Amino acid sequence: MKHLFLCALLVQPCDCLGIENIKFLFGKPYLIFLGVVALVLSICYVFYPAFKNIEGGLGCEVTVVTGDNKNDQDNTLSLVIPAYNEAERLPVMLDATLGFLNENRKQLTQLFGDACGQKRGSPDIACEFVIVDDGSTDGTGSIVKNYASNNVVGSSDTMKLVSMHQNAGKGGAVKTGMLQSSGQLCLMIDADGATDISDGLPKLLTEMKRLVASSQSSKSSFLSPAAVFGSRAHLEEKSCASRSKVRSFLMHAFHFFVKTLCSPRIKDTQCGFKLFTRSAVVLLFTNLHLRRWAFDTELVVIAEKLGISVSEVGVIWHEIDGSKLDVNKFTLALVSLGMLRDMICVRACYLLGIWKMKR
């Protein structure tokens, strides 16, 4: 009797609705309504990055913490370093980078000159460090200022601190830093120092020489737009052995969508070690819209559309503790889904003319 009474209570609300109402709830009109709602929500989700871009939010304050900021731009290598809560890892990365640059200035000057088509015997290159503090809450900006005052930076070198007024995402930070740089060649390098600069920079400069020589117009005195991407693609087979099945699956799925939606020419878009000529910086980063992790994929799309020469070079890369993506599997899946959404948004916005290409 007890169970019969409970069943009667459960059935009673349905009886009050009436047979016609029940048919409506589970009939075609209701399913059509749900389909329309799902479609609208899907469109809003896909185009959310485009909406966020409208908000602006790339205001910043630039401070020259060391150097005079009057270097010869034709003889300057800019290093753009996006940093969010990197108070611990950034000084270690700067120590390794400065040490390598100072010890190998002559060799790098020769490689830089060859890449830029300069005559041998040019003065040593100057290095411009553009560190972008992307709204950090751990005092990263203060760490940069203290580092500059307590460490020896080359007499011809400059260190700039670009303080974002609010967190803009890695894409927004890199875009701001690149447009604040002044070098003839600009290197994007992550604050964790995961890519070995002693291996990567000479390789990228050598490849840039080949790339520029193959695309440079004899009538132009300016370097043609070109970009060289550092790549970890050659390390995938080894890394898959130590990664979980979920991470390996997400990695391969991401590369599939990059190849399908962006370009089949670049196997690894996400390595934080890329070299650009000044003209490529202007063309790529004035057109860049994405603010978060997938901004690299839009750079590839823009380069394809503008005919900018792009190449990829394998570099030595190591996992560094403290990664912003060192998260659980569920969160990693959500991040991967968001990056896929961003790639679809890029294709859709350019296809529909929502985003116009500046040339």
Image: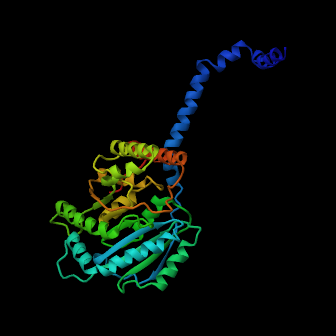
The image quarter in which residue 276 lies? bottom left
Comparing 72 with 248, the one in front is 248
- Give the quarter of the figure containing the N terminus: top right
Comparing 202 with 38, the one in front is 202
The colour scheme of the drawn protein is rainbow
The image quarter in which residue 35 lies? top right
Going 22% across and 66% down the picture, which residue do you hit?
206
Residue 165: give x, y in percent of width and height.
56, 67
Comparing 28 with 210, the one in front is 210
Picture layout, residue 81 above or below residue 247: below
Numbered label tally:
0
Comparing 183 with 137, the one in front is 137
Residue 133: give x, y in percent of width and height.
51, 69
The image quarter in which residue 208 lies? bottom left
Going 45% across and 63% down the picture, which residue do you hit?
320
Residue 302 shows up from this direction: no
Picture layout, residue 216 above or below residue 350: below
Going 21% across and 81% down the picture, which residue do you hit?
122
Residue 18: give x, y in percent of width and height.
74, 14
Picture layout, residue 214 above or below residue 154: above
Going 63% across and 19% down the picture, which residue do you hit?
26
Residue 291 shows up from this direction: yes
- Give the quarter of the figure containing the C terminus: bottom left
**Which residue extends farthest front?**
241
Residue 341: give x, y in percent of width and height.
46, 44
Picture layout, residue 349 above or below residue 95: above
